[in-house]
Image (spheres, rainbow, N blue to C red):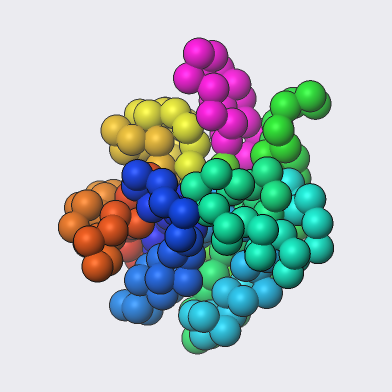
C-alpha cells in the first residue's frame, strides 16, 4: 500500500512543465495493491484508469475554475504557477483489479472558511477500510491538521465493521502524529497508519527513486507499507 502527494504533477523545484502522468506511472509500475494520491488536478481524474489500469475512486476537494479541458490547457502554460488555482484539487484511491472495491463516500474535514479538505474511504475485498486524506497545511497552528486527522479517523471508523482493519493514509501535514490504536507515524507529514492488522514498518522512497531524467518528481516522497490483509 502506497501513498503520494503528487504536488499537482509538479517537480521539486517547480517547473513550467507538468509530470503528472510520469508520476502516476512510476507509482504503479510495480503493481501496488492500493495507491492513495493527494493534490491531483481535477482534470486528471478521468485519465487515471487509462494511465494505470487500476480501479479509481476519487474525491474533489476544490472544483476547477473552468471546465476540465480548459483548466488543463491553462495550467499547462505554467504548471508551477497556476496549480490548484485553475485546475482544482482532488484525492484518489487506486486499487488493483484483482481486488473488489466499495466506495464508502467522502466527508469534509476542514473548518468553514478554510480551503476545503476532504477524506474519502473505500472497502477492499469486503474486509478492510482504507481512508485517504489531505489535511490543511498550517504549521503555525498544528492543532488545525490534527483536528482534521481526527475527523478523518472518526469517518473511517464509522464505516468499519467491528474489528475490521482500518488504514489512514495521506498527507496529514503533521509529523510524528500519534493516533490511538494505530501503527506509529513517520517523521515527515506523509503517513500510512494501520489499525488491527500486522504491517511492516513505513518505508519512504529515497529521492533517487523519484528522479526521472534528472527531474525530482513532487516535493513529497511516496511512502509505503505491506499489510497482512492484502496478500
Instruction: Tell whether position 55 is magenta.
Output: no
| Residue found farthest to the top | 140
Q: Nearer the viewer, residue 76 or 40?
A: 76
Residue 38, percent across and down? 54, 52
Answer with left or right where residue 22 lies relative to residue 129: left
| Residue appearing at x 54%, y 14% in the figure | 141
Residue drawn at (20%, 52%) of the image: 206
Q: Is residue 30 left or right of residue 121?
A: left
Residue 109, horizontal then vertical, whole percent: 70, 35
Q: Nearer the viewer, residue 55 or 19?
A: 19
Q: Main secondary structure of the magenta part?
A: helix
Asked whether the viewer can see residue 127, the reply is no
Spot occupied by residue 107 in the image (x, y as percentages of width and height): 75, 45
Q: Position of residue 70 (x, y in %)?
A: 75, 64
Q: Which residues are magenta?
A: 135-155
Judging depth in this view, the residue of 44 and 228 nearest the camera is 44
65 or 6, which is in the foreground?
A: 65
Does residue 120 appear to the left or right of 95 in the view shown?
A: right
Q: Quadrant of residue 111?
A: top right
Q: Residue furthest front?
A: 77
Whether residue 45 can be seen here:
yes
- Point out the image quarter for the N terminus: bottom left
At 22% from the left edge and 61% from the top edge, which residue is drawn?
214
What count of labels does the image hold? Answer: 0
Q: Quadrant of residue 32?
A: bottom left
Amino acid at each position: 500500500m502506497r501513498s503520494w502527494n503528487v504536488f499537482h504533477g509538479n517537480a521539486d523545484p517547480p517547473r513550467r512543465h507538468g509530470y503528472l502522468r510520469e508520476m502516476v506511472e512510476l507509482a504503479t509500475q510495480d503493481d501496488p495493491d492500493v495507491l492513495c494520491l493527494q493534490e491531483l488536478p481535477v482534470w486528471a481524474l478521468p485519465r487515471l484508469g487509462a494511465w494505470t489500469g487500476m480501479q479509481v475512486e476519487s474525491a474533489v476537494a476544490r472544483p476547477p475554475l473552468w471546465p476540465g479541458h480548459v483548466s488543463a490547457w491553462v495550467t499547462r502554460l505554467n504548471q508551477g504557477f497556476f496549480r490548484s488555482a485553475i485546475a482544482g484539487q482532488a484525492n484518489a484511491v487506486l486499487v488493483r483489479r484483482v481486488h473488489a472495491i466499495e466506495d464508502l463516500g467522502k466527508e469534509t474535514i476542514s473548518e468553514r472558511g478554510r480551503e476545503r479538505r476532504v477524506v474519502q474511504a473505500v472497502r477492499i475485498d469486503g474486509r478492510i477500510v482504507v481512508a485517504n486524506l489531505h489535511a490543511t497545511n498550517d504549521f503555525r497552528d498544528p492543532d488545525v491538521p490534527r483536528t482534521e486527522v481526527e475527523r478523518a479517523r472518526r469517518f473511517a471508523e464509522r464505516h468499519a465493521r467491528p474489528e475490521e482493519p482500518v488504514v489512514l493514509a495521506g498527507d496529514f501535514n503533521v509529523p510524528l502524529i500519534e493516533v490511538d490504536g494505530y501503527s506509529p507515524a513517520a517523521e515527515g507529514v506523509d503517513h500510512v497508519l494501520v489499525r488491527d492488522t500486522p504491517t511492516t514498518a513505513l518505508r519512504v522512497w529515497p529521492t533517487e527513486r523519484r528522479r526521472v531524467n534528472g527531474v525530482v518528481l513532487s516535493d513529497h516522497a511516496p511512502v509505503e507499507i505491506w499489510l497482512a490483509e492484502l496478500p
